[in-house]
Amino acid sequence: MRTFILGGGCFWCLDAVYQKTRGVASVVSGYIGGHFPDPDYYSVCSGMTGHAEVVAVTFDEEVIPADTVLDMFFAIHDPTTLNRQGYDVGTQYRSSMFYRTDEEKVLFEEAISRNQSLWRDPIVTEVTRASTFYPAEAFHQDYYANNQDAGYCHVIINPKLAKARKYYSEWLAS
C-alpha cells in the first residue's frame, strides 16, 4: 500500500472521488503544512494556521497505478488557481502535494509536467515535504457518503464526480 497526501481545495471533493476509486483502501481528510499544532476546522478556515485541507489517499498499486491516482487529482480540481478552488479562497484551499520521500517528490513533479498540457494556465500546485498530518474531525470523514442531499454535494461535489467518471470511469465504482 502507498499513501499520497493531496490538497485540491475542500477535502470533501477529493474524498468523494477517491472513496469511489477501485484500489483505494482508505481516504482520510485532514490538515498539513502549517505551523499551528493540533489544528481544527475552524482554525484552519481562519487562514492563520498555514495548514491546507488535504486527503491522505492509501491505495494498492497492484490495482491502480500511482500515476492514475495523481492524474485523477489533476482532473478533479483546478491546479492553476493560487489559493483558491471556486468559491473557497485562502491558503487552506491551495493545490498541494506533500511528499515523504524523494521518489514521491519526483512522481509529483512528473505528474505536474504530464498534466500541464491539459490546462491553459500554468499549474501552481505546491510540492512540499510532508510535515505532521492531522486527521480532520469525524464530521469531515466520508462527508459525501454521509451527506449526499446537502447543497454543497449537489452543486460542488456532483460535478467533480461527473468529471471523474467522464475520464476515469474504468477506475470508479458506481
Image (tube, grey):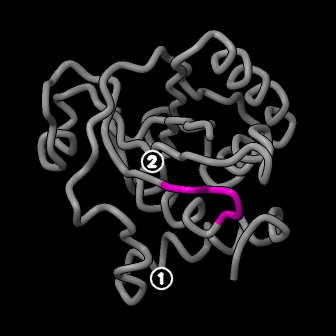
Q: Compare residues 95 and 131 and report the one nearer the observer.
A: 131
| Image position of 102 with respect to 2: above or below | above
The span from disc 1 to disc 2 (Cα, nearest Å) is: 17 Å
Query: Which tag, 1 or 2, sits closer to the chain's start?
Result: 2
Identify the residue at the far top of this view: 102
Residue drawn where x is 73% and y is 28% of the image: 112
* Residue underneath mark 2: 9
* SS state under label 1: helix
| Image position of 3 with respect to 156: above or below | above
Residue drawn where x is 43% and y is 74% of the image: 144
* Residue underneath mark 1: 154
Q: Is residue 123 magenta?
A: no
Q: Is residue 45 left or right of residue 88?
A: left
Q: Position of residue 53 (x, y in %)?
A: 36, 43
The amino acid pointed to by label 2 is Gly
| Image position of 119 with respect to 63: above or below | above
Q: Residues within 10 Å of mark 1 (few under 14, many from 20)?
A: few
Q: Compare residues 98 and 94 and report the one nearer the observer.
A: 98
Q: Which residues are magenta?
A: 21-26
Q: Quadrant of the C terminus?
A: bottom right
Q: Position of residue 94 (x, y in %)?
A: 44, 35
Place residue 38 in its image quadrant: top left
Residue 88, numbered circle: none
Residue drawn where x is 80% and y is 24% of the image: 113
Place residue 21 in its image quadrant: bottom right
Q: Quadrant of the N terminus?
A: top right
Q: Compare residues 136 and 51 and report the one nearer the observer.
A: 136
| Image position of 149 with respect to 14: above or below | below
